[in-house]
Image (spheres, rainbow, N blue to C red):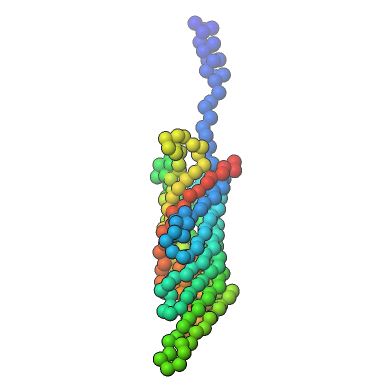
Amino acid sequence: MTQAFAQNSTDENSEEPEMQEKPKRLSLGIGFDYLKLHTLLTDNSEKWEGAVNFLILEKLSVIGEYGVAELTPEEAYKNSDYKSDGNYYRIGLDYHFTVNPNNFLLLGLRYSQASFNENIAYEIGNPVFENETGDLNRNNLTARWYEFVLTSEKKIKRIRKKDIPDFLSIGFKFRLKSLLQYDDFDDFEIKNIPGYGRTNISLNPEFNLYLKFRIPLN
């Protein structure tokens, strides 16, 4: 009995403890805004946007976003063709809340800045003489704003009932933008800012859908 007990004790001690998988603390995410791509089919504006985020802690990530846009709203000015085009970027932080292993909520803040040009081709009616036409160009304009961002993200594990590697997510972002500063003029004021939208709204909401690819770095 003593020999059997000793043998059992030796066997138990020789078993290696079970290793638990550690959470990924550093990863790279590359996202594309596919709601903005969808708008290419519904109006004449062109909008392209992408994002890169680094998960630096278990629940905290640093994010940078970059976009280019050419905005041509028809309602900007009467009897005129309006165009605002340029690029913009956002930098900020996101804090992650886990709903379940495949679903997350993120709360974030962004500092944003745009650099853009504006063109207004106008025609002013005159009942006596010929109509007055003109072309107004403004270059190297800037704008700055802050954003509060609420994000819902879901990991995609299966496509067409087939398991796929854990690298793909889809989600949506709700943004609430607060304009800080932009170049403005008394005559023909600026109507649209790439990345922000209409200037006559001090708190500008926006809704985006996105597709993200995750690359683990540790």
Name which residue lies at 50% across and 48% down: 212
Q: Where is residue 153 in the image (x, y as percent from the top left)?
A: 44, 48
The answer to whether 103 is drawn above or below residue 11 in the figure is below
Residue 78 drawn above or below residue 156: below
Tell how many labels: 0
Q: Where is residue 115 in the image (x, y as percent from the top left)?
A: 56, 69
User: Residue at (43%, 75%) from the top-left corner?
Assistant: 76
* Residue 43 location, quadrant: bottom left
Of 20 and 195, the residue lying toward us? 195
The single residue placed furthest to the bottom in the displayed view is 128
Residue 113 appears in the figure: no
Q: Where is residue 200 in the image (x, y as percent from the top left)?
A: 42, 74
Give the residue displayed 41% in from the left and 68% down from the top.
203
Residue 162 image point, x, y percent? 45, 34
Q: Residue at x 54, y 11 (%)?
A: 7
**Residue 16 appears anywhere in the view:** yes
The relative height of residue 76 versus residue 2 in the rendered view (above or below) is below
Q: Which of 178 and 214 is in front in this view?
A: 214
Q: Quadrant of the C terminus?
A: top right
Q: Which residue lies furthest to the top in this view?
A: 1
